[in-house]
Image (cartoon, rainbow, N blue to C red):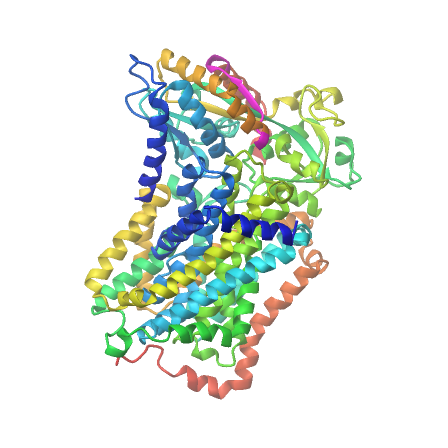
């Protein structure tokens, strides 16, 4: 195990014709990433029947290609039309879209491509470093730590909703309420399903997210008319891509923080890329000396989430190599592919299937870099989307998103949910409520509730003393306290300047 | 759109492969592809066994078989859609037993009548064992029941088959336990034992085996009538008679009213597929315990299971 295996894996992929599978995966991943409603999980799920006829290693290359490419693909849509292409790109819209509206889409795409590629590579390197102690790491995170992590995510909402704290909390409360719908995790009782079979599985994340962002944004655009960015000669000549690339190196601390958060959250089953990129974004806002510049086109706001959502793929493999359990939806399907080939994933997966695991790791790295390279090369044409008249853009995006939602599970009710969420999302835009806090609360609510109950049971209802006896849990408690106190302390320190900055109008003046 | 391309590629490959083997005269099953419903998302245990069986089944039937995932409503949506299909032999499905049996006993609305399903075959049966952490002082069920507090045992959901088996079997011997549920999958529930937050867990032997082999877990009893794992006592020899009746099945069903001849041919095809070297090799690698059983025996097994779980309605309702 170790370096020689990695070298062998690289040699194997370089010398066999199998690199074509990575390329195929990257192409598919980019397409599925760009289209709102479709994501890496969908792509992999649809690929499963095809991989059965393939060599396991080739299947891994294909899966790695898809996994590595989707989140960058999704960032393109997030930046250009304010609609995250996949769930983990939701935080990218905050600063990516304002940049596109200022005609600086090239800058944002350059930064996103570079952050994605480097984030992916950092995630994989972290994975390689941690492989020897992966098992101990996974064992350190129990229900108590899961609960505190979700709590940290929920408190971070307060940070993301700067300036409109109350509205952010209201949206989050709605998200939490929605997360209660369906089969309750501990007892298996049905709650708030109103007699509908569809709601047994709860309010689906992907239809909700697609509705909240894609559909509502299209309604908004359709009512406004025109195009996303105002066509001017100088913006048509795509500039700033290289500046975007360089900006990532200039903000290397943001890149590393984003990648680290991505890897850690990725390693925790059930939280996933949406939470990872959200936490990367909010922590960057918190650490910034100028938090009010976010939301108006701060390039750092693109780098943080995009490095996190690619790094999470490396992290998600940590529990996979340690115990054969998936860290993300994509790795779950990856393990499914292994089982399909007669391999039973478990703690010995890494020993018995070194070739496949390292093949996947190499493919993942190649894909992250390759997808970004393709992105950089095609950026100048992609940006033209922002100049397309909304009368053409809107129907296309709506049709494609709703089709994607239907394809995902073949459930017509998903499409209805997506449209309902689209209308709700539009109302939230109109009345200035943050939509992402609702989505994040919906993601976290289930894990928070489940792990809270589990912690109570395993600690014999002595939760506080149980938490205090666990080092990681104590660190997380400190993190939560800090997240809650930081804005207050900052307000004290910069009281005046902040108030002045907050009075700057939130919306860009139209040129 | 992509879904169609994917399926049609597979369909095309399958069609060419089966063209040669196609019998000359028969109508069924060559009118159209047979839909094989999986009531869960791709990647899980039910999905895997269906997709592994698909090529061997196509060969045995000389017809095209297309797996279709219809997840939702805890697996009952897919099962109900099989139930409501025409009983023409073109729709079959894999059923979660005893999961549905338990819901049925509890009087929950499954959306279909489990007693009327046409049973075709049982493919595999998993037996249970109780595992503790490898370095735990607990060495037997007696130890587990005399900790001075109720033993904690981890499970996925309170309605999962292993949770049901855990609660019923320990209630049978009047041993108090706390069933800590809510783990995301059976692997997570086993890792909870390794972390030490629970004392033990009851899981299929095949799932536990990999963690026993890696030195993380140790088995204290298998729920079987005879020796199942070397060096581990079985429930029968310890005097826990009924424990071996708890198991987990992969059983195939079709809509009510399926003609007998089609049922027989499907059943034979499944048995033939299960005996094929490809499936045998796959099952060995993937740790699946094949237990192929034909149509009439599968139906008898189903009514036996209903009777067995019905006795424990009180325990199940109590939660």
- Between A471 and A307, the residue placed more toward the observer is A307
Taking the spot 40% from the left edge, 23% from the top edge, the residue there is B58
* Residue at image location 62% in from the left, 31% down from the top: B206
Task: Name the one closer to the observer, A509 or A298.
Answer: A298
Q: Which residues are magenta?
A: B285-297
The residue lying at 61 percent from left, 67 percent from top is A479
Magenta stretch: includes residue B216: no
- Position of residue A158 in the picture relative to residue A465 (left or right): left
Which residue is farthest right? B137
Picture mark count: 0
Q: Is residue B34 visible?
A: no
Q: x%, y% of residue B267? A: 44, 16
Q: State whether residue B139 is above or below residue A286.
A: above
Above or below, comparing residue A161 to residue B177 in the picture: below
Q: Nearer the viewer, residue B156 or A326?
A: A326
In the picture, the quarter occupied by the N terminus of chain B is: top left
| Quarter where residue A506 is shown | bottom left
Q: Is residue B85 left or right of residue A500?
A: left
Figure check: B257 above or below A143: above
- Tell me if residue B303 can be seen: yes
**Quarter holding the C terminus of chain B?**
top right
Q: Nearer the viewer, residue A135 or A494?
A: A135
Residue A126 is drawn in which quadrant? bottom right
Q: Dividing the picture into quarters, in which one does residue A145 lie?
A: bottom right
Q: Residue furthest bottom?
A: A496
Q: Position of residue A163 (x, y in %)?
A: 43, 76
* Residue B84: image location, x then y, percent: 34, 27
The residue most toward the front is A15
């Amino acid at each position: 195990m170790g370096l020689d295996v990695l070298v062998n894996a690289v040699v194997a992929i370089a010398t066999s014709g199998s690199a074509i599978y990575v390329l195929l995966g990257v192409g598919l991943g980019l397409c599925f990433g760009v289209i709102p409603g479709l994501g890496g999980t969908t792509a992999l799920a649809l690929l499963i029947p095809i991989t059965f006829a393939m060599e396991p290693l080739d299947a891994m290359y294909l899966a790695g290609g898809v996994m590595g490419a989707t989140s960058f693909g999704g960032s393109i849509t997030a930046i250009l039309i304010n609609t995250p292409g996949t769930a983990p790109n939701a935080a990218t819209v905050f600063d990516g879209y304002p940049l596109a509206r200022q005609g600086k889409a090239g800058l944002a795409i350059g930064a996103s491509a570079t952050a994605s590629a480097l984030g992916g590579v950092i995630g994989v390197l972290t994975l390689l470093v941690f492989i020897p102690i992966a098992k101990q790491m996974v064992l350190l995170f129990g229900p108590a730590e899961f609960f505190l992590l979700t709590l940290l995510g929920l408190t971070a909402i307060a940070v993301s909703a700067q300036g409109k704290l109350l509205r952010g909390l209201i949206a989050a409360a709605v998200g939490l309420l929605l997360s209660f719908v369906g089969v309750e995790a501990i007892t298996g009782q049905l709650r708030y399903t109103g007699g509908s079979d569809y709601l047994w599985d709860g309010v689906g994340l992907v239809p909700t997210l697609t509705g909240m962002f894609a559909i509502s944004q299209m309604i908004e655009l359709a009512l406004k008319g025109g195009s996303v960015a105002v066509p001017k000669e100088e913006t048509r000549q795509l500039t700033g891509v290289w500046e975007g690339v360089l900006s990532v190196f200039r903000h290397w601390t943001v890149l590393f923080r984003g990648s680290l958060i991505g890897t850690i959250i990725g390693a925790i089953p059930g939280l996933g890329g949406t939470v990872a990129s959200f936490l990367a974004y909010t922590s960057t806002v918190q650490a910034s000396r100028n938090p009010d510049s976010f939301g108006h086109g701060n390039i750092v706001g693109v780098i943080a989430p995009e490095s996190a959502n690619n790094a999470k793929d490396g992290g998600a493999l940590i529990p996979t190599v340690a115990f054969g359990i998936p860290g993300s939806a994509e790795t779950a399907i990856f393990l499914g592919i292994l089982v399909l080939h007669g391999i039973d994933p478990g703690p010995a997966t890494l020993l018995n299937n070194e070739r496949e695991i390292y093949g996947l790791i190499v493919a993942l790295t190649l894909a992250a870099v390759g997808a970004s390279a393709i992105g950089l090369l095609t950026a100048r044409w992609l940006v033209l989307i922002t100049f397309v008249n909304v009368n053409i853009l809107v129907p296309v995006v709506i049709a494609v998103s709703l089709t994607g939602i239907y394809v995902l599970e073949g459930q017509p009710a998903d499409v209805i949910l997506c449209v309902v969420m689209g209308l709700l999302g539009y109302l939230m835009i109109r009345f200035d409520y943050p939509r992402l806090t609702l989505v994040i609360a919906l993601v976290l609510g289930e894990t928070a509730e489940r792990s809270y109950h589990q912690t109570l049971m395993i600690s014999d209802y002595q939760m506080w003393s149980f938490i205090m006896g666990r080092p990681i849990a104590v660190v997380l408690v400190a993190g939560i306290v800090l997240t809650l106190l930081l804005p207050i302390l900052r307000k004290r320190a910069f009281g005046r300047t902040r108030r002045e900055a907050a009075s700057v109008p939130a919306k860009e003046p139209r040129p | 759109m992509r879904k169609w391309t994917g399926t049609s590629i597979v369909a095309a490959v399958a069609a060419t492969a089966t063209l040669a083997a196609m019998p000359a005269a028969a109508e069924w099953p060559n009118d159209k592809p047979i839909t094989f419903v999986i009531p869960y998302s791709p990647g899980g245990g039910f999905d895997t066994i269906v997709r592994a069986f698909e090529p061997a089944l196509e060969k045995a039937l000389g017809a095209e078989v297309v797996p279709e995932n219809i997840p939702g409503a805890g697996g009952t949506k897919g099962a109900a859609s099989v139930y409501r299909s025409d009983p023409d032999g073109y729709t079959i499905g894999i059923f979660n037993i005893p999961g549905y049996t338990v819901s049925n006993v509890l009087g929950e609305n499954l959306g279909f009548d489990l007693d009327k399903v046409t049973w075709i075959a049982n493919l595999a049966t998993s037996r249970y064992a109780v595992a503790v952490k490898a370095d735990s002082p607990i060495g037997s069920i007696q130890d587990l029941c005399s900790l001075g507090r109720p033993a904690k045992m981890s499970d996925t959901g309170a309605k999962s088959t292993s949770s049901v088996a855990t609660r019923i079997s320990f209630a049978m011997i009047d041993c108090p336990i706390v069933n800590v549920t809510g783990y995301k999958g059976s692997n997570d529930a086993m890792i909870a034992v390794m972390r030490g937050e629970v004392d033990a867990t009851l899981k299929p032997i095949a799932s536990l085996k990999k963690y026993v082999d890696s030195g993380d877990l140790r088995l204290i009893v298998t729920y079987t009538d005879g020796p199942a794992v070397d060096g581990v006592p079985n429930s029968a020899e310890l005097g826990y008679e009924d424990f071996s009746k708890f198991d987990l099945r992969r059983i195939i069903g079709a809509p009510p009213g399926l003609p007998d001849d089609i049922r027989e041919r499907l059943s034979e095809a499944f048995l033939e597929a299960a005996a094929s070297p490809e499936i045998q090799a796959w099952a060995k690698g993937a740790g699946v315990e094949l237990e192929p059983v034909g149509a009439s025996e599968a139906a008898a097994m189903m009514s036996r299971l209903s009777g067995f779980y019905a006795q424990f309605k009180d325990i199940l309702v109590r939660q």
